[in-house]
Image (spheres, helix red, strand yellow):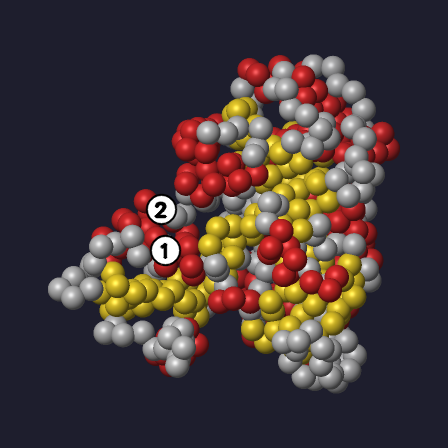
Amino acid sequence: MNLAHLLARAARLHPARTAVALGAAPVLDHAALARRTAGLAAGLRGRLGLAQGDRVAILMQNHPAYLEALFACWWAGLAAVPINAKLHAREIGYILGHSEAGACLVTDDLAETAADAARDAEAAAILIAGSKDWEGFCAAEGSDPAEAAPGDLAWLFYTSGTTGRPKGAMLTHRNLLAMTACYFMDVDMIAPGDSILHAGPLSHGSGLYILPHMAKAATQVMPESGGFDPAEIFSLLPSHRGVTIFAAPTMVHRLAESPLAGSADTASLKTIVYGGAPMYLGDCRRALAMFGGKLAQIYGQGESPMTITALTKADHADRHHPRHEARLSSVGVAQTLVELCLADAEDRPVAVGEPGEILVRSETVMAGYWRDPESTAATLRGGWLHTGDVGRLDDEGFLTLMDRSKDLIISGGANIYPREVEEALLAHDGIAEVSVVGRPDPDWGETVFAFIVPKPGAEPSPEELDRLCLERIARFKRPKGYRILDTLPKNNYGKTLKTALRKRLADENM
């Protein structure tokens, strides 16, 4: 089934219910959203000449037009390629070129960035939300959603790796419908008239949760700031009903620590779903004390979107359970449609309580990586998704994460891969070696920190290195600190020991 049918069904059953709001103000009901989406879809196919299965990039901050863009892709039988709006133009250009996007749908504030990126990539016609062409498309007559097979590409999810360029996880209509079903079975229930407040980027987790909320004709609320601001969130809660927020643990921490939290009216806050990194136990306790039993946790990856394990609101609230603390430190149990296995380096299952790589088999698991058969074969070998994450299962099936894969840094909920930062810094003529790691931070979870070995006679300054990074990578990936070393710690094979560097930083913070 085409994912666009979720919108078509909501428009048929609940035409007058608000589909999209900007801040406290309604923007479109479901009937109007479906009508405009159908017209935009017809324009993408007819006027822009896109064919079934073509890819369409979406480069927007959180904005009401995001809903039109995303569902128009599916309505037209196209695949959406949501792009993180914080990326550098060069990074955006790579994704446009690699995905072979035939169009890029943007908001006005990102039109110039998109033009630069498309020029570098020699790709993608640009269509600006709210422009004369956009409004003309949306006002035109549309047709029913295109036919789509369950295995057709729906969302090309670009997730970086530590060994080079980002990889595009191919998420099908089947994958995302299975994710939606798991949300209702394992995370939370939604009623018509409920809402989701999109404080996180729609290009990632919060955007994926558009789908279960569309399935129940809930309201998709876009903050006027376009992002996460605790004061704005607290001010918006009384204006909406049954509010869900998807948040990184650092965002939950900032909400709970906000001076407004104690006096804010949170009666309409129904659920905070957190994920993207494990929650520190102390932060989880403080959030439970502040918001009550409204927390749920998910563990997933772009390759199995939002769907590997879940820790329910009931698990969070069950303070009298003898393993309550252990459960709060875990990421919950395998979701209903997911098979979970922990394995050793030879893919042999390990015993309960023993550490192993987390393997996943499910209808939610991606079809593979776009134009990358070697990585696909390695990651999906034996029919299991090899997450690269190390965990431990207890005898009740609760999974505790022990380490994140491949030195990933998670700062404020954003994934940052050291290799990208290292390559940017190595463009400096005075740097011989560099190693980038995450430094623990009470507000952001981690910040980026770079250890640098300069070439003889060179003395690169932090200001020079900042400028170099800003020319090549997104601002949020730039190191927040630098340390000059004579040598990097290495093992007998010459591999840099990042564990030793992380320990050095941790010891300094004690």
State the image coordinates of residue 198 (x, y, percent, origin top left): 61, 45
On screen, residue 229 above or below 317: above
Which mark is first along the chain, 2 or 1? Answer: 1
Task: Report how far apart the C-alphas of labels 1 and 2 lie in the structure.
Answer: 9 Å
On screen, residue 459 above or below 208: below
Residue pointed to by mark 1: 423
Quadrant location of residue 147?
top right
State the image coordinates of residue 82 (x, y, percent, origin top left): 58, 40
Numbered disc 1: secondary structure? helix
On screen, residue 61 above or below 130: below
Depth check: give the residue in front, 491 or 29. 491
427 lies left or right of 2:
left
363 lies left or right of 436:
right
Depth check: give the residue in front, 420 or 280. 420
The amino acid on which the numbered mark 2 sits, given as a three-letter code, is Arg
State the image coordinates of residue 44 (x, y, percent, origin top left): 65, 22
Residue drawn at (56%, 34%), measured in percent from left and top? 100
Given contact means CB atoms under 8 Å apart, are the residues at marks 1 and 2 in contact?
yes
Numbered disc 2: secondary structure? helix
Residue drawn at (69%, 47%), measured in percent from left and top? 171
Q: Residues within 10 Å of mark 1 (few under 14, many from 20)?
A: some
Q: Nearer the viewer, mark 1 or mark 2?
A: 1
Residue drawn at (48%, 59%), measured in percent from left and top? 163
Taking the image as drawn, is residue 80 in sight?
yes
Q: Which mark is residue 472?
A: 2
